[in-house]
Image: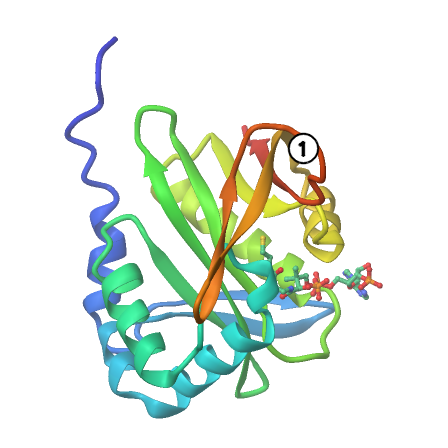
Amino acid sequence: MKQCMSDRHIDIFHEWKQSPFGSHVLRGTIQNNPFSLWCVTYDCLNDQEIIRLLARWRKTHERWFPSIFPVTEERTRSWLKERVLDVGDRILFLIRVDDRYIGHVGLFRYDPNQRSIDLDNIVRGEEGRKGIMQASLETLMEWVKHVLSIRVFTLQTTSDNSKALMLYYRLGFSETRRVPVVFHQADDGGVWGETDDGPNISRYHVYMKKEVA
Ligand SMILES: CC(C)(COP(=O)(O)OP(=O)(O)OC[C@H]1O[C@@H](n2cnc3c(N)ncnc32)[C@H](O)[C@@H]1OP(=O)(O)O)[C@@H](O)C(=O)NCCC(=O)NCCS
């Protein structure tokens, strides 16, 4: 099969992340009210307010992430640099409404052969503006669909995350498979790992996809 080895469209993620914070913003509306998605950039590593927000939201929602550990601002800064900004096909956007940030949405794991990408780091950090998460994802998907000619969106969530499942069904995603997971306890937290089916399974990773024209 012919491999699409020279797809450099993804470089736009790198360019945006290296730009000054605020220079790349996606815009949308919900019930006639504007909102914007601000690309998280290297500048944000020096913005204590943003690091604090990301850390607080991560801590609040830790049960929905695959790994659990003591969340600190320092650790959050390292994660943002090494696991998001330095990763070529990963990008994160802060959702901004009425001059405040209320959550984030992101993209990861671009596959130029399949023309697919994962929705990543979908977190509502603050209450209010019902429907803003769905509207933000619609705006993000519309943008990346055009810049990377995406045909398939993929994502992974957990079977007990009913809020997330409802959101993804509303967006038109459907389940492709589910895999049992077990929690591996560590001294200061632990990790959910996939396993073979068996007794006492109470949680599954749910993989979903949405094909777009
Ligand atoms: C998953 C998550 C992002 C979903 O957020 P959300 O607030 O439910 O999503 P939305 O902002 O789209 O709001 C949805 C609600 O608004 C309603 N809604 C949607 N559009 C609306 C509109 N135009 N007007 C009024 N209400 C609307 C929906 O019916 C839904 O209502 P419900 O909560 O009563 O079911 C959030 O629960 C979260 O951050 N969870 C923790 C982190 C997490 O699990 N992330 C996903 C990992 S895979």
The x, y position of residue 200, in whole percent, is: 72, 40
The x, y position of residue 158, in whole percent, is: 63, 47
Q: Residue at x 63, y 28 (%)?
A: 197
Residue 149: image quadrant is: top left
Q: Quadrant of the C terminus?
A: top right
Q: Residue at x 34, y 39 (%)?
A: 110
Which residue is at the front of the view, 136 or 72? 72
The residue indicated by pointer 1 is: 174
Q: How is the image coloured?
A: rainbow
Residue 22 in view (yes/no) = no
Residue 163 in view (yes/no) = yes
> In this rendering, would 181 be left or right of 128?
left
Q: Residue at x 23, y 74 (%)?
A: 42
Q: Few, some or many C-alpha atoms within 10 Å of disc 1 (few <14, some 14-19, many ≥20)?
A: some
Q: Quadrant of the N terminus?
A: top left
Q: Quadrant of ligand 1?
A: bottom right
The x, y position of residue 134, in whole percent, is: 66, 57
Residue 19: image quadrant is: bottom left
> In this rendering, would 51 be left or right of 201?
left
Instruction: Decide: is 90 above or below 197.
Output: below
**Helix, strand or loop for disc 1:** strand
The x, y position of residue 136, in whole percent, is: 57, 61
Instruction: Decide: is 32 above or below 121.
Output: below
Instruction: Decide: is 52 above or below 202.
Output: below
> In this rendering, would 20 be left or right of 166?
left
Instruction: Name the residue furthest bottom.
Output: 48
> In this rendering, would 164 be left or right of 59?
right
Q: Residue at x 31, y 88 (%)?
A: 47
